[in-house]
Amino acid sequence: MGKQKLLDRLLSPEDQERVLSQIRQIEKNSSGEVRVHLSDQRVKDVYQAARKTFSALGMTATRQRNGVLIFLSIASRRFAIIGDEGIDRVTASDYWDKLRDSMAEQFQAGHFADGLLELLARVEEVLILNFPYQEGDVNELSDEISYHISKPNPLPWLIVGGILLSPLFNLFTALALRRSGLEFLMRRNKFAALINLAAWVTGVLCYLAWYLFYRPWS
């Protein structure tokens, strides 16, 4: 999946521009630095993944240590908000967790644009209050939405391939045995067909489980 395709799955081009405009407005009215990062990688600990991304994007290098990262793991259907130590000094220790929890319903309902814009508005409030714009402030980091694109997962396609090929394999095997006069092996082939049928049903269930519970946000 390409970067633009990943972004387009969540936000329309108009919504993307709205998000970027909101980020630029925040950085115009405060000295804070705000980034939005999308990842299609499934993560066990979204907070730790967000922390690593925060450092990888150079957000610990701002002069006042007042960067904020909104990290969305699309495959895990989770998100985290990370504030640098400068912001942590002026906010409650659970401020970002409470903000994340208050926004979770929007994202879970698929309202990504509205959720992001509302979240950015809340971030703007705390930045303007504690880090208002001062003369000489410069934009230290890119405003663009960043991405992490993992390699395609072949598992769903392997499952589908197995589901489609299993009955065809049994059919051709049965025809070959009948034409070659080895009909006595048909009983064994029927047993093999039962095994393949069980594998086919298992494959269908595995694919449904992946589709319902593990596929990325759509």
Image (spheres, rainbow, N blue to C red):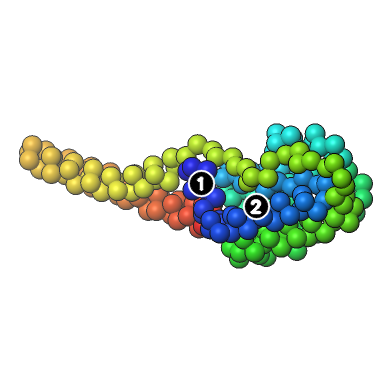
The numbered mark at residue 20 is 2
Question: Can you see residue 169?
Answer: yes
- Amino acid under disc 2: Leu
Q: Residue at x 39, y 42 (%)?
A: 158
- Amino acid under disc 1: Gln
Viewed as shown, does residue 29 lie left or right of 160?
right
Estimate the x, y position of residue 111 in percent, counting from the top left: 61, 64
Callout 1: helix, strand or loop? helix
Viewed as shown, does residue 143 lie left or right of 188?
right
Q: Residue at x 72, y 39 (%)?
A: 141
Q: Is residue 203 above or below residue 55?
A: below
Whole-angstrom CA distance, mark 1 to mark 2, is 15 Å
Q: Residue at x 81, y 37 (%)?
A: 62
Q: Earlier in the sequence, mark 1 or mark 2?
A: 1
Label 1: which residue? 4
**Badge 1: how crowded within 10 Å, few (<14), some, or many (20+)?**
few
Q: Quadrant of residue 39?
A: top right
Question: Can you see residue 46?
Answer: no
Q: Residue furthest front?
A: 135
**Badge 2: how crowded within 10 Å, few (<14), some, or many (20+)?**
some
Residue 198 versus residue 109: which sits nearer the camera?
109
Estimate the x, y position of residue 170 in percent, counting from the top left: 23, 45
Estimate the x, y position of residue 123 in percent, counting from the top left: 78, 56
Q: Residue at x 13, y 39 (%)?
A: 176
Q: Residue furthest right?
A: 90
Q: Is residue 47 above or below residue 106?
A: above
